[in-house]
Amino acid sequence: MALTETVPAAPAHEGILRRQSLRESAARTYARSLPIVPVRARGLTIEGADGRRYLDCLSGAGTLALGHNHPVVLEAIRTVLDSGAPLHVLDLATPVKDAFTTELFATLPGELAEKARIQFCGPAGTDAVEAAFKLVRTATGRDGLMAFSGAYHGMTSEALAASGGAQHTSVVRLPYPYDYRCPFGTGGERGAELAARWTQNLLDDHKSGVPSPAGMILEPVQGEGGVIPAPDGWLRRMREITAARQIPLIVDEVQTGVGRTGAFWAVDHSGIVPDVIVLSKAIGGSLPLAVIVYREELDAWQPGAHAGTFRGNQLAMAAGAATLAYVRANGLDRRAGELGARMLARLTSLAAAHDCIGDVRGRGLMLGVELVDRDADADATGARPAAPELAAAVRDACLDRGLIVELGGRHSAVVRLLPPLTITDEQADAILDRLADAITAAVRTTPGPMGSSPTTMRGTTP
């Protein structure tokens, strides 16, 4: 009898990935660029079904303030599970909800928290954005909205309409200060001042075609837009402009909140107090939770004006209260600011060695590296065209080296770093070491445009 060759079975994780590609929709996102199957996780580290370990610098798109499976989060969840408390209660009052709300209000700007109302929304940040829009329209009797170029506020209809990629919308789009690619060609404080002047002129010019809006929404740091921090002075100007014209200011802190930027809330840097603050991601301690908190004078809703079956996620509230308390008690917001500044300084040194890095920026542990075409001519402000193919190659090279990052920005050319607030100095160094190595590898293997030679480090030859 002839011998037959035994074909080894494919590893289990490959089968899982294959079935995902066959069963899940074409709209899936992270799974396309991160073909891993996580099976265990703790802190910064994820272990895949293939046995490899990864440093997770995506952190659930900023959701995991304390990293994966932090002990205080697990204990909070276990306590609720072991207590026999109901897990689903619609919007009824519970001790768990009361504790969460109390802890949340303790972290908010005092002027807002003193006379605030909270609305528990559906479990995603985009539903909270929708709620904020409904709220200000009801309170003001007006309809229009103002948002900013490059913004991202969610994927439901109104939230998407206020985001930068909207194609058909009545939302008025305003210039957001973007130092590296300044829409006015000046950058710096001058660019931010021109952006503020444009906004003020649009509102005060009776022939501008822009009636007084129901509200203005902005991000203190544009995350998906490419990690673009708004200058504190510009934020104060937006607050002055809106307050003087009785326009409610909505601040989207879905990704910037809970210590991410080096302050508990990103608005704390500038000292502004918004009329409405939109919160999700980290406030649920890794579980789905979204709320808006707003000035009580805006509370003109009728019962049921904004509702949802899953407004009462008890496990998320318990995990969220534990997370908020832990960040506050351990000063993780200040720690994020200090460590983020050191990481940004090292990224700046990395940019000095690589012509393909056009800009590095960020605030706290919300950092971005914008990759550009070094062979193209710079514009009048020194900015070169984005290099999305190189950025994708860097992301892939990072994954090969056990580092999970994602991309953002106008052309998906910004490598984004969103590590947990709990990382150590040594872990921060490991992240940057792997990123630096990945950039070096990617520039050697990624062809430049029009078939030119690969991008290289300054002072080297291909």
Image (tube, helix red, strand yellow):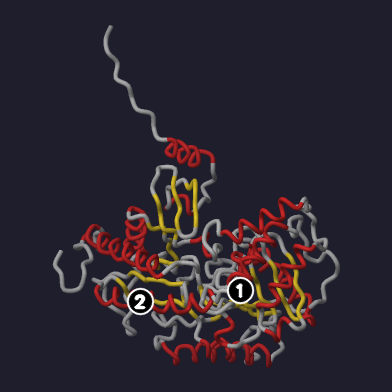
Residue visible at 70% across and 86% down in the picture: 111
Estimate the x, y position of residue 383 in percent, counting from the top left.
Answer: 33, 78
Q: Which residue is mark 1?
A: 252
User: What crowding class fits label 2: few (fewer than 14 Cα within 10 Å), some (14-19), or many (20 or more)?
Assistant: many
Q: Which quadrant is the C terminus positioned in?
A: bottom left
| Residue 369 sits in quarter | bottom left
Image disc number at residue 461: none
Q: In this figure, which residue is indicated by the disc labeled 2?
A: 359
In the rendered view, does 112 fall on the left or right side of 376? right
User: Which residue of the protein is positioned furthest toward the left in this rendering?
Assistant: 461
Residue 116 horizontal/vertical position (percent): 76, 79
Question: For the residue marked with disc 1, what is the amino acid?
Answer: Asp
Q: For numbered disc 1, what is the local secondary structure?
A: strand
- In the picture as drawn, the residue positioned furthest to the top comes out as 1
Q: Is residue 32 above or below residue 194?
A: above
Q: Are marks 2 and 1 in contact (CB under 8 Å)?
A: no
Q: Left or right: where does residue 416 sit relative to residue 379?
A: right
Type of residue at label 2? Asp
Residue at image point 34% right, 69% down: 371
Question: Can you say which quadrant of the picture contains the N terminus?
Answer: top left
Q: How far apart are labels 2 and 1 at the CA level?
A: 24 Å
Badge 2 element: strand
Image x and y of residue 273, in percent = 65, 85
Question: Where residue 153 sits: x, y (%)?
Answer: 59, 68
455 left or right, relative to 89: left
Q: Quadrant of residue 381?
A: bottom left
313 shown above or below 386: above
Mark 2 or mark 1, earlier in chain: 1
Mark 1: few, some, or many residues within 10 Å (few <14, many ≥20)?
many
Residue 253, image quadrant = bottom right
The residue at the point 25 percent across, 72 percent down is 354
Name above or below for residue 166 compared with residue 23.
Answer: below
